[in-house]
C-alpha cells in the first residue's frame, strides 16, 4: 500500500519558506510509529532538512542531481521507481509539497495530522477530499496551545 503522511494546517499548509512552523511532539511520535520498518520517500527539499536518515527505515530521495547523498540515503531518479516496486510492504511518501502533488493519484491512504489553525504557509498539501474519504479520526488532541486530530483518509 502506498501511504502519505503529513501534518497540515486548516488551509492545507505544510510549511512556510522557513520550514514547518509548529512543534508537536505527539505528531513526531505518530510519524515515527507509523513509518518505522517501512520504506519512505522524500523529495530533495525535504531531504535537505534531514541531518541523517530516519532510523529503521530505508530512506529514498527523488533527485535528478548526480551529487552523492548523505550516508544512509538512497537516490532514485523518479518517484515511479519507488511506487511501482514489486514488494507488498507499505511504502510511505513523507513530502514535500511537490512530491505529494505529483504522486497523490497513486496514494491508497493519507495519514493527516489536521492542525486547527492557520500558519500562513507557502507550501501546501494537494486537494484530496474529492478522491478520499475520512475513515478514522482521533479524539481532539492539544499540545502547545494547538488543537489537532490524527486522521486517516482512504482512497475512494
Image (cartoon, rainbow, N blue to C red):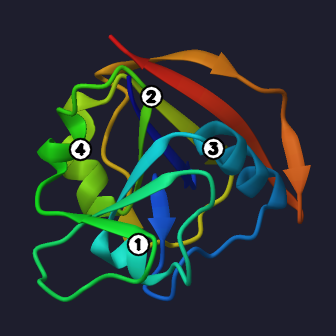
The residue lying toward the viewer, choosing from 46 and 145, is 46
Cα separation, mark 3 vs mark 2, equals: 10 Å
Asked if disc 2 and disc 4 are in contact, CB closer than 8 Å, the reply is no
Cα separation, mark 3 vs mark 1, equals: 18 Å
- Residue in view at x 43 percent, y 50 percent: 40
Cα separation, mark 2 vs mark 4, equals: 11 Å
Q: Position of residue 97 (x, y in %)?
A: 33, 61
Please tell me whether mark 3 or mark 1 is closer to you in this view: 3
In what quadrant of the picture does the C terminus appear? top left
Residue underneath mark 4: 82
The residue lying toward the viewer, choosing from 50 and 147, is 50
Circle 2 Cα neighbour tier, 10 Å, few/some/many (<14 / 14–19 / ≥20): some
State which tag comes first along the sequence, 1 or 4: 1
With respect to residue 34, does 10 lie above or below? below
State which tag comes first along the sequence, 3 or 4: 3
Cα separation, mark 2 vs mark 1, equals: 20 Å
State which tag comes first along the sequence, 3 or 1: 3
Please tell me whether mark 2 or mark 1 is closer to you in this view: 2
Disc 2 is placed on an element classified as loop
Cα separation, mark 3 vs mark 4, equals: 17 Å
Asked if disc 3 and disc 2 are in contact, CB closer than 8 Å, the reply is no
State which tag comes first along the sequence, 3 or 2: 3
Residue underneath mark 1: 46
Please tell me whether mark 1 or mark 4 is closer to you in this view: 4
Q: Quadrant of residue 123?
A: bottom left
Asked if disc 3 and disc 1 are in contact, CB closer than 8 Å, the reply is no
Residue underneath mark 3: 36
State which tag comes first along the sequence, 2 or 1: 1
Q: Position of residue 115 (x, y in %)?
A: 67, 51
- Residue in view at x 22 percent, y 37 percent: 83
Disc 1 is placed on an element classified as helix
Residue underneath mark 2: 90
Amino acid at each position: 500500500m502506498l501511504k502519505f503522511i503529513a501534518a497540515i494546517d486548516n488551509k492545507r499548509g505544510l510549511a512556510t519558506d522557513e520550514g514547518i512552523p509548529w512543534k508537536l511532539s505527539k505528531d513526531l511520535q505518530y510519524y515515527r510509529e507509523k513509518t518505522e520498518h517501512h520504506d519512505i520517500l522524500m523529495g530533495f527539499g525535504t531531504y535537505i532538512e534531514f541531518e541523517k536518515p530516519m532510523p529503521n527505515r530505508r530512506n529514498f530521495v527523488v533527485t535528478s542531481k548526480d551529487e552523492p547523498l548523505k550516508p544512509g540515503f538512497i537516490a532514485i531518479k523518479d518517484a515511479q521507481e519507488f511506487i511501482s516496486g514489486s514488494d507488498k510492504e507499505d511504502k510511505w511518501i513523507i513530502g514535500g509539497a511537490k512530491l505529494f502533488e505529483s504522486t497523490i493519484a497513486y496514494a491508497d491512504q493519507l495519514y493527516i495530522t489536521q492542525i486547527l489553525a492557520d500558519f500562513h504557509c507557502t507550501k501546501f498539501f494537494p486537494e484530496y477530499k474529492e478522491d478520499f474519504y475520512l475513515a478514522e479520526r482521533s479524539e481532539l488532541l492539544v499540545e502547545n496551545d494547538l488543537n489537532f486530530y490524527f486522521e486517516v483518509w482512504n482512497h475512494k
